[in-house]
Amino acid sequence: MNTNSKTKHLKVVVFFIGAIATGLVSVMNSENTAPTPEVEEAPVVSAETFADIGEMLPEAILDIRYAGNNNFVGKPVDGYAAPRAIVSHEAMQALVNVQQQLREQHRTLVIFDAFRPQRAVDHFVRWAEDLNDSATKQEFYPSVPKSELFERGYIAAKSSHSRGSTVDCTIAEWNDSLQQYVELDMGSPFDYFDPVSWPSDTTISDVARRNRMILQNIMVQHGFSPYPQEWWHFTLSGEPYPETYFDIELTDSLMLTR
Ligand SMILES: [Zn+2]
């Protein structure tokens, strides 16, 4: 199959920071910026590498926190110009299977984050280094000194999300009387930097512990691995780009087709 037949939409060509592995850190727009002489040209990947969760799972609820103010940075994060959720096609297929099973239970996935541009992770690092900015402390890290967010592993210079096969998610259940989906009680909010967010935490209610296991079990059943320090975070086992940290900006105009 040739490329033209695969995509009728605008095909967006983007650069990624596989770059980091080879010491290349500059990211350039393909139309406007020529590579500077001292910088080796970054590898090019087509947007066909990824699938759009919003398009593939229309029933899933997208609550893309880093595109708005309701996150630990307190404002939209670099790279999230639009509330988009994209993942590798392999991770997408696994999520389709998860959603299919949830649908039979009158439940749905809620996605907080999926692919995360490397520039967003860089933004997190700059935020964590700015010890004067503690505006979101009460809501997101009340018991952890901001100066310890790195050493305790809550913030890092690289994130598995940038490899395109990791999602942050929860489950919502249809509520007949409210006539809407309601998120299951998971015992702590998304991105709450605290041991209470560890899936194994025993201080939360029995209901919340059970709900965490419902989420973990269904994700694992369809190929994801859980993360011991965040109940919401899952990475596809055998992910297709284990060494690549992509830097695609999430915008309204980013079109993904296959
Ligand atoms: Zn995550």
Image: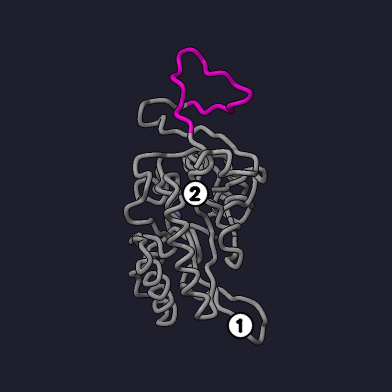
Is disc 1 placed on a helix, strand or loop? Answer: strand
Q: Label 2 to label 1, Cα distance in Å?
A: 30 Å
Q: Quick check: 167 above or below 17?
A: below
- Residue, disc 2: 115
Q: Specify whether tag 2 is near ligand 1 (CB below 8 Å).
A: no
Residue 213 versus residue 135: which sits nearer the camera?
213
Residue 171 lies, in percent from the top left, at 51, 71
Q: Residue furthest front?
A: 1
Position of 206 compared to 81: left or right?
Answer: left
Q: Is residue 245 visible?
A: yes
Confirm whether the magenta stretch covers residue 27: yes
Considering the whole magenta stretch, tell me its main secondary structure: loop
Q: Which amino acid type corresponds to the residue marked 1 in the rendered image? A: Asn
Residue at the image position 44 percent from the left and 29 percent from the top = 43
- Residue, disc 1: 175
The total of numbered circles placed on residues is: 2
Q: Is residue 127 visible?
A: no
Q: Quick check: 28 above or below 141?
A: above
Confirm whether the magenta stretch covers residue 156: no
Question: Of marks 2 and 1, which one's residue comes earlier in the chain?
Answer: 2
Residue at the image position 35 percent from the left and 62 percent from the top = 223
Residue at the image position 65 percent from the left and 77 percent from the top = 180
Crowding at dot 1, Cα within 10 Å, few <14 / some 14-19 / many 20+, comes out as few
Q: Which mark is residue 110?
A: none
Quadrant position of ligand 1: bottom left
Q: Quick check: 172 above or below 36?
A: below
Crowding at dot 2, Cα within 10 Å, few <14 / some 14-19 / many 20+, comes out as many
Position of 16 compared to 201: left or right?
Answer: right
Q: Which amino acid type corresponds to the residue marked 2 in the rendered image? A: Phe
- Report the span colored magenta: 26-44
Residue 93 lies, in percent from the top left, at 45, 59
Residue 119 versus residue 53: which sits nearer the camera?
53
